[in-house]
């Protein structure tokens, strides 16, 4: 209960910080989208009234995955719902190297369990998501609910990308195809992975920067394996931040909570209280929005990563980026879905500023149908 109370206090403090930032630094003029990335596409989608009719999607989904030879599905959660969101446990592990690995694992496991207890299926993947996918695929395709620290720093995302590469390389074989579905900053892990596979030198340079705290083993062989594989990436509410480098073996779909038929909404920041314009976190989690790491070592590493990944914790940069109100990544198909989760009363906690809708179990089959239609081009 103490962990839950601490997490609640932290969340409340973050809310006060966000609204103070809006009031002090941001204007309320409608932004102008200077450009839409040439390789990006978008489509407006309304949540159907009968979205529950997608309950029979399993047969089509299984046939589709088999036809496209998908061998595994990864679910990857976003920021603040992992097993060490503020990298405190990692800091304790470094300060007390004689502490049993079993104890550290138990602390991480209980932290993640507490996160799942609080968040459930709001902005988070839980066991029920895995069970749903297992039923949809008749248990024939392995499902991995990949867990990472969920820290909001370059360092946290870089080492978690290496962990994801390690996991895929351990599970899969040359030439196989994998579907990865990620919420929020999980999309940054996917984007980093595409960068590392496109340019091996970037992977080695990032590995060198984090090497004082994180050891990367046998990177060359793992990258060589993954470069033969096919990847289908689906992001849900991922802020447009790290650049994507797609190969012919990759497909990319972005699902975004967006209200209206204009790609740029009025900047009604206090509309965030009622989720008036859709997903606000997706536009706030951009360059400059990182937290400051708890240790000087991590702070130093984050600074060294900035030339590769952009500003980390920088309010001036964040203000300018938020002013753009941009929803679009540098590439991929963007589905701007009206989830009708706006309210006439403050619902920002319930919806997490419109950011928690993507992982709701009641909508899971609907999202599967979007993946089938727009990623695999199979109509439901």
Image (cartoon, rainbow, N blue to C red):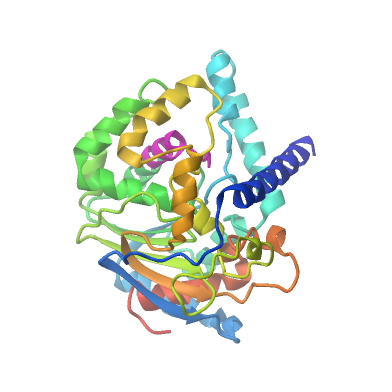
Residue at x 60% of width, y 86% of height: 49
Q: Closer to the camera, 301 or 316?
A: 316
Does the stretch in magenta take in 183? no
Measured along the vertical axis of the image, is residue 343 above or below residue 283?
A: below
Picture quarter with the C terminus: bottom left
Residue closest to the eye, 52 or 329:
329
Q: Which SS type dominates the magenta stretch?
A: helix
Q: Please say if 328 is above or below 82.
A: below
In this image, 99 relative to 299: left or right?
right
Q: Please say whether residue 153 is one of the residues in the magenta stretch.
A: yes
Q: Which of 23 and 235 is in front in this view?
A: 23
Residue 182 seen in the figure: no
Residue 113: give x, y in percent of width and height. 66, 44
Residue 90 appears left or right of 351: left
Asked whether the viewer can see residue 275, the reply is yes
Whether residue 213 is situated above or below residue 239 in the rendered picture: above
Residue 215 in the image: above or below residue 65: above
* Highlighted range, magenta: 149-162
In-image side of 328 versus 6 (left or right): left
- From the top left corner, tell me how far across and down residue 188 is, in percent: 40, 49
Quadrant where the N terminus is found in the figure: top right
At horizontal 60% and vertical 52% (from top left) the residue drawn is 22
User: Residue at position x 25%, y 53% from top?
Assistant: 245
The picture places residue 178, in percent across and down from the top left corner, at 34, 58
* Residue 85 point in image, percent of width and height: 58, 38
């Amino acid at each position: 209960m103490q962990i839950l109370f601490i997490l609640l206090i932290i969340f409340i403090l973050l809310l006060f910080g966000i609204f103070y930032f809006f009031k002090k630094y941001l204007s309320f003029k409608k932004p102008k989208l200077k450009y839409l990335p040439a390789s990006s596409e978008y489509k407006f989608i309304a949540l159907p009234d009968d979205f529950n009719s997608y309950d029979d999607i399993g047969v089509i989904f299984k046939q589709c995955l088999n036809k496209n030879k998908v061998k595994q599905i990864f679910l990857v959660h976003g920021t603040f719902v992992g097993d060490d969101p503020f990298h405190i446990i990692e800091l304790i592990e470094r300060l007390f190297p004689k502490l049993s690995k079993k104890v550290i694992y138990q602390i991480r496991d209980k932290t993640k369990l507490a996160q799942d207890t609080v968040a459930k299926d709001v902005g988070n993947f839980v066991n029920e998501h895995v069970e749903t996918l297992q039923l949809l695929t008749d248990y024939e395709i392995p499902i991995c609910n990949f867990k990472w620290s969920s820290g909001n720093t370059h360092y946290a995302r870089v080492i978690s990308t290496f962990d994801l590469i390690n996991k895929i390389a351990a599970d899969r074989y040359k030439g196989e195809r994998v579907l990865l579905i990620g919420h929020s900053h999980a999309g940054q892990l996917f984007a980093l992975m595409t960068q590392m596979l496109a340019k091996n030198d970037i992977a080695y340079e990032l590995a060198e920067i984090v090497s004082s705290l994180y050891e990367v083993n046998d990177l060359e062989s793992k990258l060589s394996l993954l470069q033969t594989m096919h990847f289908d990436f689906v992001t849900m509410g991922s802020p447009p931040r790290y650049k994507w480098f797609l190969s012919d073996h990759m497909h990319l779909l972005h699902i975004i909570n967006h209200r209206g038929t204009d790609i740029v909404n009025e900047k009604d920041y206090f509309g965030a209280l009622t989720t008036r314009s859709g997903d606000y976190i997706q536009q706030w989690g951009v360059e400059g929005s990182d937290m400051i790491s708890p240790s000087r070592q991590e702070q130093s590493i984050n600074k060294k990563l900035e030339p590769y990944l952009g500003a980390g914790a920088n309010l001036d940069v964040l203000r300018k980026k938020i002013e753009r109100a941009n929803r679009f990544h540098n590439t991929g198909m963007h589905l701007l879905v009206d989830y009708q989760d706006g309210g006439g009363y403050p619902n920002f906690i319930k919806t997490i500023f419109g950011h928690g809708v993507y992982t709701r179990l009641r909508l899971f089959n609907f999202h599967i149908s979007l993946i089938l239609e727009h990623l695999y081009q199979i109509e439901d």
